Amino acid sequence: MRKSSNKVLCIIGAIVLSLCIVLSGCGSTTTTTTTTTSVTTTTTPTTRTVMDQNGNAVVIPYKETRVAPQIGAMAHMTALLGDSNEIVCAADSSLNATFRKIFPGYVQANPKGLSTSNVEDVIASGAQVFMVPSPTRRRLPNIKRPVLQ
């Protein structure tokens, strides 16, 4: 009889303990949390100044979105760096079908196949920056675009 009364007492104790835990969770305690959010605004500059090969300060857009690399290797490097969709004019004859297949962004950015071998194409492309190798820079007419080496 003693064993059965111990079992009953354990069960009653477990029920009472469970009820205490459940009922203590249903209390009406109000907790107010106040959070303050500070807004920090940062402005990205619209232009930046770089030096050209002659040491002249040239102002270019902070983020170029339209570039014209004059030789195929520069176009390849620009595309490999993830910016094929920004090449609006290039040495088009140097860029074969494989290049166009791998970098469809180039085809979308330069649908007319504008070539950097033609100054009028460079101007028509609206390129923000014209990238050329050193010897070419001296032969360029004034195209009114930043020219970087």
Image: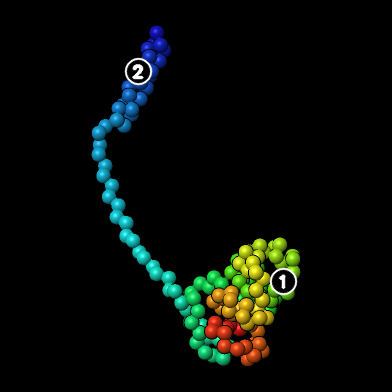
Find residue 92 and report its image quarter. bottom right
State whether residue 20 appears in this view.
yes
Is the residue marked by circle 2 packed among few (<14), some (14-19), or many (20+) residues within 10 Å?
Answer: few
Please say if 82 is above or below 21: below
| Quadrant holding the N terminus | top left
Q: Position of residue 127 (x, y in %)?
A: 56, 76
Q: Position of residue 43 (x, y in %)?
A: 39, 69
Which structural element holds mark 1? loop
Q: Position of residue 56 (x, y in %)?
A: 52, 89
Judging by the rendered image, the residue that carries numbered circle 1 is: 95
Please say if 25 is above or below 59: above
Q: Are marks 2 and 1 in contact (CB under 8 Å)?
A: no
Q: Nearer the viewer, mark 2 or mark 1?
A: 1
Q: Tell me which residue sits at (37%, 12%) in the image.
A: 5
Residue type, mark 2 in image: Ile
The Cα atoms of the two marked residues, 2 and 1, are separated by 85 Å
Judging by the rendered image, the residue that carries numbered circle 2 is: 12
Is the residue marked by circle 1 packed among few (<14), some (14-19), or many (20+) residues within 10 Å?
Answer: some
Q: Tell me which residue sits at (65%, 84%) in the image.
A: 133
- Which colour assignment does the render follow? rainbow
Residue type, mark 1 in image: Leu
Please say if 122 is above or below 101: below
Q: Which residue occupies the foreground of this view, 122 or 57?
A: 122
Find residue 134 and report its image quarter. bottom right
